Image (spheres, grey):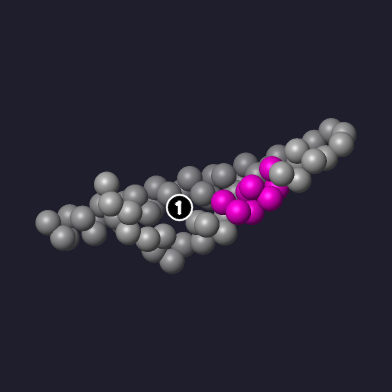
Amino acid sequence: MRYFSDHGLPLVQLKERRRELVVALQNRIGPIGDEDLLKIAAIQQTISAFEDVIADLDAEMLDRAA
């Protein structure tokens, strides 16, 4: 499948933010708080939703091109 673009969605920024949060947790000493895990989970859900939307938009573009 060809990759077109992120269609203006902030997918790269979200992935970078998720990575920053995970790295911060790896460098942390002590227990991980629920709030930190919820932030990462929320970002991951948003990333998954954006990826689904992008896949749908890409499929529509392929259908139009055919």
Q: Is residue 53 left or right of residue 31?
A: left
**Residue 27 location, quadrant:** top right
Q: Position of residue 55 (x, y in %)?
A: 34, 50
Image quarter of the C terminus: bottom left
Q: Residue at x 24, y 59 (%)?
A: 61
Amino acid type of disc 1?
Phe
Q: How many marks?
A: 1
Residue farthest bottom in this picture: 8
Residue 16 is one of the magenta-drawn residues: yes
Residue 4 is one of the magenta-drawn residues: no
What secondary structure is found at the residue carrying circle 1? helix
Residue farthest top in this picture: 31
Residue receiving disc 1: 50
Q: Which residues are magenta?
A: 15-22
- Compare residues 20 and 61 and report the one nearer the observer: 20
Q: Residues within 10 Å of mark 1 (few under 14, many from 20)?
A: some
Q: Position of residue 23 (x, y in %)?
A: 71, 44
Q: Residue at x 76, y 41 (%)?
A: 25
**Residue 8 location, quadrant:** bottom left
Residue farthest left in this picture: 66
Res. 62 visible in picture: yes
- Compare residues 28 and 32 and report the one nearer the observer: 28
Res. 33 visible in picture: no
Main SS of the magenta part reads helix
Q: Residue at x 69, y 43 (%)?
A: 22
Q: Position of residue 30 (x, y in %)?
A: 87, 34
Q: Position of residue 49 (x, y in %)?
A: 46, 48
Q: Is residue 34 left or right of residue 1?
A: right
Q: Is residue 43 left or right of residue 26?
A: left
Q: Residue at x 83, y 40 (%)?
A: 28
